[in-house]
Each structure stands twice: as C-alpha cells, then as structure tokens.
Image: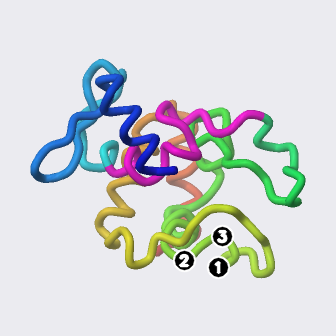
C-alpha cells in the first residue's frame, strides 16, 4: 500500500526520488524538509499528504477501530505532549492507552528517534500559533 502511494506521488510530481531518499516537490505546497519527506513516505498513506486524515475519522470502522485522524489543526494531535506523540509513533498507541486497538503501525526499527522527531517537528510546523502554543504547554507539563 505504501509503495503504491509513493509511486502515485512520484508520477504526479509531488515527490522526487533521489539517491538519498525522497524530496517533496514545491508543487505540493509544502517545504522540502527531511521531516516532510519522512512524513510523506511513512505517514501520508493513512494521514494524507496534506495531513487531512481519513474521511469520517471519528466514526468507527466495522473493525471497531477508528480511521487515521488528521494531523492538521482540525484533528487532535496538537492536544498531546511531545512525549506522548513520540511514544505513540515509536511504540504504538497502546503504549499510552493500554488495550486500545489501532491500525497504526509501530515505527520502532523503521524510523530512528531523530527521524521520529523530524516528522513530529514537521507536523507541528503546520499548525497555527494557538495550537503550537497549547501543545508546547502540554509538553512542558509532560516532559520527555
């Protein structure tokens, strides 16, 4: 699934393959940063290239699980501290909510700690000031 999305992004000109990985085209409206490229490669297949999430993300699927939420300001990602977000990406949502079942994969062994931080920094860079300020306060109250 991820490779099909990637192929479509390359064909559409939104992503360019390089000898070192992938760069997001300026045509996509985003900044060409390692965090954005990592997001497109690892997260956009579910959370959307524009961080929009899956349709009806608050309505449970037949499996009982929720679709992937948006990571833009319309979602709830900015309600979580850096510590929680990092832990969710690295170890899965059940690591902060025991017993919770999610379709999100665990990225430990896929992304380094530095890469996870780059992805989260990219996501946070897209939020409006009030969301970034709220999330920064949450992170101060729940330090890494």
At horizontal 36% and vertical 21% (from top left) the residue drawn is 29
At which x and y percent is residue 87? 53, 73
- Asked if the magenta segment contains residue 136, the reply would be no
Q: Nearer the viewer, residue 107 or 2?
A: 2
Please tell me how crowded label 2 is: few (under 14), some (14-19), or many (20+) other residues with Cα within 10 Å.
some
Residue under pointer 2: 91
Position of 59 relative to 139 (above/below): above
Please tell me how crowded label 3 is: few (under 14), some (14-19), or many (20+) other residues with Cα within 10 Å.
many
Q: Helix or strand or loop: what does disc 2 sit on?
A: helix
Position of 6 relative to 86 (above/below): above
Q: Quadrant of residue 65?
A: bottom right
Residue under pointer 1: 95
Q: Which residues are magenta?
A: 38-55
- Asked if the magenta segment contains residue 53, the reply would be yes
Q: Nearer the viewer, residue 62 or 138?
A: 62
Label 1 with label 3: CB-CB less than 8 Å: yes
Q: Helix or strand or loop: what does disc 3 sit on?
A: helix
């Amino acid at each position: 699934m991820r490779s099909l999305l990637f192929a479509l992004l390359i064909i559409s000109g939104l992503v360019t393959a390089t000898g070192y990985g992938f760069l997001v085209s300026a045509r996509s409206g985003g900044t060409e940063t390692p965090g954005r490229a990592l997001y497109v490669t690892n997260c956009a297949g579910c959370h959307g290239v524009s961080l929009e999430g899956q349709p009806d993300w608050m309505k449970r699927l037949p499996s009982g699980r929720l679709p992937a939420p948006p990571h833009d300001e319309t979602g709830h990602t900015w309600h979580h501290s850096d510590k929680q977000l990092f832990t969710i990406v690295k170890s899965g949502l059940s690591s902060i909510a025991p017993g919770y079942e999610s379709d999100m994969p665990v990225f430990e062994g896929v992304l380094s700690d530095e890469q996870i931080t780059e992805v989260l920094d990219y996501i946070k860079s897209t939020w409006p000031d009030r969301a970034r300020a709220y999330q920064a306060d949450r992170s101060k109250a729940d330090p890494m």
